Image (spheres, grey):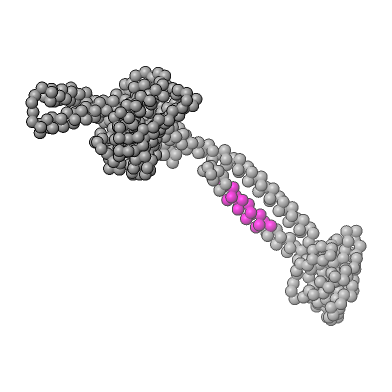
Amino acid sequence: MHLRTKLVLATLALLTAICLAIGVFGHVAMSTYLTAQLDRALTPAAGRAGFPDGPPPGSDSRDGRGPFRSLDPGNAAGQRPGTLNVVFDDGRARTSALVQEDGSTEPLTDADLGILATLDPAAGPEEVTLSSGRYRVDAADLPTDADGSILVTGLSTTERDSTLSSLDAIIAGLALAGLALTGVVGTVIIRRSLRPLEELSGVATSVSQLPLSSGDVAVAVRVPPSAAEPGTEVGAVGIALNEMIDHVTDALRARQASETKVRRFVADASHELRTPLTSIRGYTELILMSEPVSAAGRSALERVDSESRRMSSLVEDLLLLARLDEGQREAASPVDLTELVIETTSDARVSATTHSWALELPEEPVEVHAVETEIRQVLINLLANAHKHTPPGTSITVSLRGDESAASVAVTDTGPGIAPELLDSVFSRFSRGDAARSSGTGSTGLGLAIVQALVEANSGTVTVTSGPGRTQFTVTLPA
């Protein structure tokens, strides 16, 4: 959930709670006030029931201290509609009257009288529900000259309930209107307030999408001044983000400068080593061919020749990687991948006769757009890796697949497999798998690194899957 949504919802929830509290308080307060009004109106209503013209001077129509001259609950003079009066003698209704809208009176039903007969004069006013509606009623003992008689007077609560309903409707309407207005205005205000955060997020997203892993790094994205003003929380974050980007840029530039120096050193050193290594090999071969040496000396010279050849191979690999790092490559052209696979596999079969070789080719030739010498080197390295790091008798299968979008070459062997902890670093430079796979010869650890560099230079990918008895390297190139 977005932050602005959370803020709007929290504001609306708080406002809803406030409106609800105001509505409940207003309803209770108004109900209490109107109920008190009804209670105050019960006393004169009871008096008018016995004295249409009012009680005589010095008498009290409710406390029984003054005698009633007459008692006529059916007398509607001065009574408002909805007023009821009932006289009970020893629990039995003597007479009852309910004032109608036109001023006439009607007796109460037996069910209503049964409810009113249970009222206690000492309990005070209370509310009852009768067949004609809800009433606020009060019971009082009649004066001493009518012992055992009780006068019950009631007033309809219709007006009070209608007023409360209108009040509730008004409060609910105002609350809903206020919530809607708050939601709209609050959304606009919060959206504008959080707009600088969106700018910060956009800057961070742009930086995260920059190619910072290699090459000359220049992070030109910065937080705009509108979102980096000091003195505000968002501005402080914007300033900190700009400082972090500057720091990262300086660190990446320092790293790139260091990598450039190392690569230049490796390239220069490899280039300078080619001549002396060639001289060592030449003089060694010359001595072996022209000079008589002992068996031990010949063995030593042959060892020197073997190691110089190995070192020359390492130097050539380093020079190749250095050229790739600097972008020194030939132009790409259509390459018959089927022919390359056949040629490199045939050469590998000749150099590794102790292994079993198999080819799986499609019926139609497969072509890719790449640098032929680089793809040839990829295949040579993969095939050499397959037979150097597996024991004699291992089956190696080279399969080629192709369609309109891509072509893939898979080199699969049935050797012991690569240790799981080495799979993630198998394409790293100077990564050796001899500890995990049987090795008859030494390895420089650059063969698979060259494979990955050459494949990526040709817009392809190389993957590896390995387990006991099956290891497969798959190269995929765009058609």
Whether residue 17 can be seen here: yes
- Along the line of sight, the residue nearer the viewer: 391 or 242: 391
Q: Which residues are magenta?
A: 11-27
- Along the line of sight, the residue nearer the viewer: 374 or 174: 374
Q: Residue at x 8, y 28 (%)?
A: 293
Whether residue 424 can be seen here: no
In magenta stretch: residue 25: yes
Q: Position of residue 40 (x, y in %)?
A: 76, 65
Q: Residue at x 38, y 28 (%)?
A: 456
Q: Position of residue 195 (x, y in %)?
A: 50, 36
Q: Quadrant of the C terminus?
A: top left
Q: Residue at x 64, y 43 (%)?
A: 180
- Along the line of sight, the residue nearer the viewer: 146 or 112: 112
Q: Is residue 30 left or right of residue 362?
A: right
Q: Position of residue 119 (x, y in %)?
A: 78, 74
Q: Quadrant of residue 162?
A: bottom right
In magenta stretch: residue 383: no
Q: Residue at x 57, y 46 (%)?
A: 9
Q: Quadrant of residue 409?
A: top left
Q: Is residue 269 left or right of residue 354?
A: left
Q: Position of residue 98 (x, y in %)?
A: 87, 65
Q: Quadrant of residue 130?
A: bottom right
Q: Is residue 329 above or below residue 354?
A: above
Q: Is residue 228 left or right of residue 302?
A: right
Q: Identify the main secondary structure in magenta.
A: helix
